[in-house]
Image (cartoon, rainbow, N blue to C red):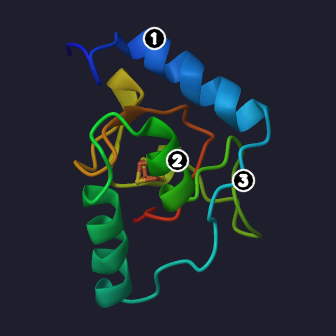
Amino acid sequence: MGAILGKDTATVLKEIEEMLADGLKTQTEPFPETAVEFAKLLDELRALEPDDLKGRLVIGGFTDYPYGEDEMRCQECIYYLVHRKWCDLPELSVPVEPNWWCRLWKI
Ligand code: SF4
Protein backbone atom coordinates (compact mmCIF):
# COMPACT_ATOMS: atom_id res chain seq x y z
CA MET A 1 0.00 0.00 0.00
CA GLY A 2 1.46 3.31 -0.98
CA ALA A 3 0.67 6.89 -0.30
CA ILE A 4 -2.77 8.39 -0.04
CA LEU A 5 -3.33 12.01 -0.94
CA GLY A 6 0.45 12.28 -1.26
CA LYS A 7 0.96 11.32 2.39
CA ASP A 8 1.75 8.01 4.02
CA THR A 9 -1.05 6.05 5.63
CA ALA A 10 0.09 6.59 9.21
CA THR A 11 0.07 10.35 8.68
CA VAL A 12 -3.43 10.29 7.22
CA LEU A 13 -4.68 8.08 10.07
CA LYS A 14 -3.26 10.55 12.59
CA GLU A 15 -4.91 13.48 10.82
CA ILE A 16 -8.25 11.70 10.87
CA GLU A 17 -7.87 10.74 14.53
CA GLU A 18 -7.10 14.33 15.45
CA MET A 19 -10.01 15.81 13.50
CA LEU A 20 -12.46 13.37 15.10
CA ALA A 21 -10.95 13.81 18.57
CA ASP A 22 -11.25 17.57 18.15
CA GLY A 23 -15.00 17.10 17.71
CA LEU A 24 -15.36 17.54 13.94
CA LYS A 25 -19.11 17.63 13.25
CA THR A 26 -19.84 14.93 10.69
CA GLN A 27 -23.16 14.10 9.03
CA THR A 28 -24.03 10.83 10.77
CA GLU A 29 -27.69 11.27 9.76
CA PRO A 30 -29.62 10.45 7.72
CA PHE A 31 -28.40 6.91 7.26
CA PRO A 32 -28.94 5.88 3.58
CA GLU A 33 -31.84 3.41 3.71
CA THR A 34 -32.05 2.69 -0.01
CA ALA A 35 -29.63 2.03 -2.88
CA VAL A 36 -30.60 5.39 -4.37
CA GLU A 37 -29.75 7.25 -1.16
CA PHE A 38 -26.49 5.33 -0.90
CA ALA A 39 -25.59 6.21 -4.51
CA LYS A 40 -26.37 9.87 -3.82
CA LEU A 41 -23.84 9.89 -0.97
CA LEU A 42 -21.26 8.35 -3.29
CA ASP A 43 -21.96 11.14 -5.79
CA GLU A 44 -21.39 13.74 -3.08
CA LEU A 45 -18.10 12.09 -2.14
CA ARG A 46 -16.98 11.95 -5.78
CA ALA A 47 -17.66 15.67 -6.15
CA LEU A 48 -15.04 16.50 -3.49
CA GLU A 49 -11.51 17.57 -4.33
CA PRO A 50 -9.21 14.52 -4.16
CA ASP A 51 -7.30 16.00 -1.21
CA ASP A 52 -10.40 17.00 0.77
CA LEU A 53 -9.97 14.58 3.64
CA LYS A 54 -12.20 16.57 5.99
CA GLY A 55 -14.98 16.55 3.39
CA ARG A 56 -14.88 12.77 3.20
CA LEU A 57 -15.19 12.53 6.96
CA VAL A 58 -18.06 15.02 7.10
CA ILE A 59 -20.13 13.59 4.24
CA GLY A 60 -19.29 10.04 5.34
CA GLY A 61 -20.57 10.84 8.81
CA PHE A 62 -17.51 9.36 10.49
CA THR A 63 -17.39 8.62 14.21
CA ASP A 64 -14.40 7.39 16.20
CA TYR A 65 -16.65 5.06 18.20
CA PRO A 66 -19.24 2.35 17.43
CA TYR A 67 -22.48 3.96 16.36
CA GLY A 68 -26.10 3.56 17.38
CA GLU A 69 -27.96 1.05 19.52
CA ASP A 70 -26.51 -1.79 17.43
CA GLU A 71 -22.98 -0.45 17.99
CA MET A 72 -22.12 -0.66 14.30
CA ARG A 73 -18.40 -0.55 13.53
CA CYS A 74 -16.00 -0.67 10.62
CA GLN A 75 -14.89 -4.09 11.86
CA GLU A 76 -18.13 -5.69 10.59
CA CYS A 77 -18.47 -3.59 7.43
CA ILE A 78 -17.94 -5.29 4.06
CA TYR A 79 -15.56 -2.51 3.02
CA TYR A 80 -13.21 -2.97 5.97
CA LEU A 81 -9.88 -4.63 5.24
CA VAL A 82 -8.87 -6.13 8.58
CA HIS A 83 -5.17 -6.64 7.94
CA ARG A 84 -4.65 -3.17 6.50
CA LYS A 85 -7.06 -1.37 8.83
CA TRP A 86 -8.35 0.26 5.68
CA CYS A 87 -11.71 1.34 4.22
CA ASP A 88 -11.81 -0.11 0.72
CA LEU A 89 -14.85 1.81 -0.50
CA PRO A 90 -13.21 3.65 -3.42
CA GLU A 91 -15.00 6.92 -2.65
CA LEU A 92 -13.50 6.90 0.87
CA SER A 93 -10.17 5.01 0.63
CA VAL A 94 -8.90 5.97 4.05
CA PRO A 95 -7.23 4.21 6.98
CA VAL A 96 -9.77 3.45 9.71
CA GLU A 97 -9.76 1.84 13.14
CA PRO A 98 -11.96 -1.24 13.67
CA ASN A 99 -14.18 0.47 16.24
CA TRP A 100 -14.98 3.51 14.07
CA TRP A 101 -18.05 3.86 11.89
CA CYS A 102 -19.42 5.86 8.98
CA ARG A 103 -22.85 6.00 7.36
CA LEU A 104 -21.70 4.11 4.25
CA TRP A 105 -21.52 1.13 6.60
CA LYS A 106 -22.77 -2.08 5.00
CA ILE A 107 -22.89 -5.77 5.93
S1 SF4 B 1 -17.57 2.23 4.68
FE1 SF4 B 1 -17.56 3.36 6.62
S2 SF4 B 1 -18.08 1.80 8.15
FE2 SF4 B 1 -17.41 0.72 6.30
S3 SF4 B 1 -15.20 0.39 6.60
FE3 SF4 B 1 -15.48 2.28 5.45
S4 SF4 B 1 -15.41 3.87 7.02
FE4 SF4 B 1 -15.85 1.95 8.07
Badge 1 crowding class, 10 Å Cα cut-off, few under 14, some 14 to 19, many 20 or more, is few
Q: Nearer the viewer, residue 19 or 70?
A: 19
Q: Name the image quarter holding residue 8.
A: top left
* Residue 57 circle label: 2
Residue type pointed to by label 1: Ala
Which mark is on residue 25?
A: 3
x 56%, y 54%: residue: 58
Density class for disc 2 (Cα within 10 Å; few <14, some 14-19, many ≥20) is many
Residue closest to the eye, 26 or 99: 26
Q: CA distance from mark 3 to mark 2?
A: 9 Å
Amino acid found under the numbered disc labelled 2: Leu
The one nearer the camera, 82 or 100, is 100
Relative height, residue 101 to residue 29 (above, below): above
In the image, 56 versus 93, the foreground residue is 56
Residue 38 location (% of width, % of height):
35, 77
Q: Is residue 68 found left or right of 56 in the rendered image?
A: right
Q: Which residue is mark 1?
A: 10
Q: What residue is shown at x 55% (from left), y 36% (from top)?
A: 98
In this rendering, the answer to whether 22 lies above or below 79 is above
Q: Residue 103: x and y, percent?
A: 52, 64
Nearer-N-terminus badge (3/2)? 3
Q: Which mark is residue 33?
A: none
